[in-house]
Image: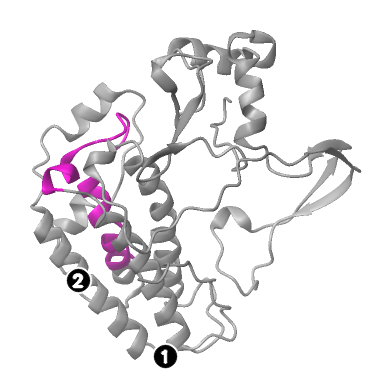
């Protein structure tokens, strides 16, 4: 099977129905392939992250988003499944696992096969909507098909965020798709210099008529004075960050601000989330949790850390 690749977003001033359909299909397939990697129906009812919904929510969420947005702009005149379009509409953002448990304790989740059937229905509705809706280019923020573009980009966001949830499952609950290949790693870390970037005035914001879809936070105009700064020539790699870890960087408060140090000590964080200490101990090397497998730590891959780190 060929490797599955993500296609680029179409220009909204020159696209045609075929281009949009192909982009939608690619986005849909990415999420389909990801969700079909889960082994066993029971896996869909697990919450890999204590602050997020069960995985079945994300199976239905992107599909429901299309329908609700279409209803909002008049591309549809009636729901497909009103119960689903409420159940899967809005995610969660609790402060604690207990808060999430309280918010979801009365939910009766549907069967996995029923949600897959709903997705199939939505897929057909979206294709039909694209085919029958006049393009009348360009597609701008007040154009009905702007809701479609929002739905596609929303599904791509959840492709990324769902992958981070799924990555927290035991590997036994996943089966890597044939079309999924990891990046090559040569095990070597290239020299990475800090480069000086001159300061100056920077204009932020995209114009309203920009021909690529954007979220509301991307628009507007703002000028910011930026002081000179240093930036690494390349993304910081696992190999470089390993030096920080081995040099006890996680135990030195001088490298952390107050909030981040509190987070680190509260949860006893010793290394990036998807590093696995070999033999359960430190300074014995690390394995790496890729999406579907545990592999040797790829030293030349960019390190994945959170805001605190």
Q: What is the span of residues highlighted in magenta in the rendered image?
A: 40-69
Q: Quadrant of the C terminus?
A: top right
Q: Nearer the viewer, residue 12 or 304?
A: 304
The crowd level at tag 2 (other Cα within 10 Å; few <14, some 14-19, many 20+) is few
**Residue at position x 66%, y 40% from top?**
188
Q: Nearer the viewer, residue 214 or 110?
A: 110
Residue 280 sits in quarter: top left
Percent x, y of residue 148: 40, 72
Q: Nearer the viewer, mark 2 or mark 1?
A: 2
Residue 201 as seen in the image, left or right of residue 163: right
Percent x, y of residue 223: 80, 49
Residue 1 as seen in the image, left or right of residue 295: left
Percent x, y of residue 20: 45, 80
Relative to 142, residue 305 above or below: above
Residue 48 sits in quarter: top left
Q: Which residue is identified by label 2? A: 120
> In the rendered image, is residue 53 in sight?
no
Q: Secondary structure at mark 1?
A: loop
Instruction: Indicate yes or no whether the magenta region holds residue 5.
Output: no
**Residue at position x 16%, y 41% from top?**
45
Relative to 138, residue 219 above or below: above
Main SS class of the magenta portion in the image: helix
> In the rendered image, is residue 26 in sight?
yes
Q: Which disc, if any, is residue 134?
A: 1
Relative to 100, residue 90 above or below: below
Instruction: Indicate yes or no whether the magenta region holds residue 55.
Output: yes
Q: Could you tell me how far apart the alpha carbons at marks 2 and 1 are, in whole angstroms?
A: 24 Å
Q: Are marks 2 and 1 in contact (CB under 8 Å)?
A: no
């Amino acid at each position: 099977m060929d490797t599955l690749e993500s296609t680029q977003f179409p220009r909204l001033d020159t696209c045609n129905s075929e281009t949009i359909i192909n982009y939608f299909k690619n986005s849909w397939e990415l999420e389909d392939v990801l969700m079909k990697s889960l082994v066993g129906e029971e896996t869909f009812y697990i919450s890999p992250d204590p602050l997020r919904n069960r995985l079945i929510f994300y199976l239905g969420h992107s599909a429901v988003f299309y329908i609700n947005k279409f209803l909002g702009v008049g591309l549809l005149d009636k729901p497909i499944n009103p119960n689903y379009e409420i159940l899967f509409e809005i995610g969660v953002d609790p402060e604690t696992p207990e808060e999430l448990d309280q918010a979801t304790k009365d939910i009766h989740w549907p069967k996995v096969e029923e949600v897959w059937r709903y997705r199939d229905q939505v897929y057909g509705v979206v294709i039909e909507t694209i085919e029958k809706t006049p393009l009348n280019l360009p597609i701008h923020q007040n154009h009905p098909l702007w809701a479609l573009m929002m739905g596609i980009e929303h599904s791509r966001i959840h492709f990324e965020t769902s992958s981070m949830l799924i990555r927290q499952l035991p590997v036994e609950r996943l089966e890597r798709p044939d079309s999924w290949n990891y990046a090559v790693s040569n095990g070597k870390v290239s020299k990475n210099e800090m480069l000086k970037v001159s300061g100056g005035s920077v204009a932020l914001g995209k114009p309203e008529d920009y021909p690529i879809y954007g979220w509301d936070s991307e628009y507007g105009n703002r000028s910011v004075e930026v002081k000179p700064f240093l930036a690494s020539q390349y993304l910081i790699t696992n190999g470089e960050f390993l030096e920080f870890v081995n040099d006890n960087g996680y135990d030195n408060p001088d490298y952390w601000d107050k909030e981040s140090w509190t987070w680190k000590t509260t949860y006893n964080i010793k290394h990036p989330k998807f590093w696995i200490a070999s033999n359960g101990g430190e300074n014995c090397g690390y394995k790496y949790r890729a999406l579907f497998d545990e592999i040797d730590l790829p030293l030349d891959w960019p390190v994945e850390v959170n805001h605190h780190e």
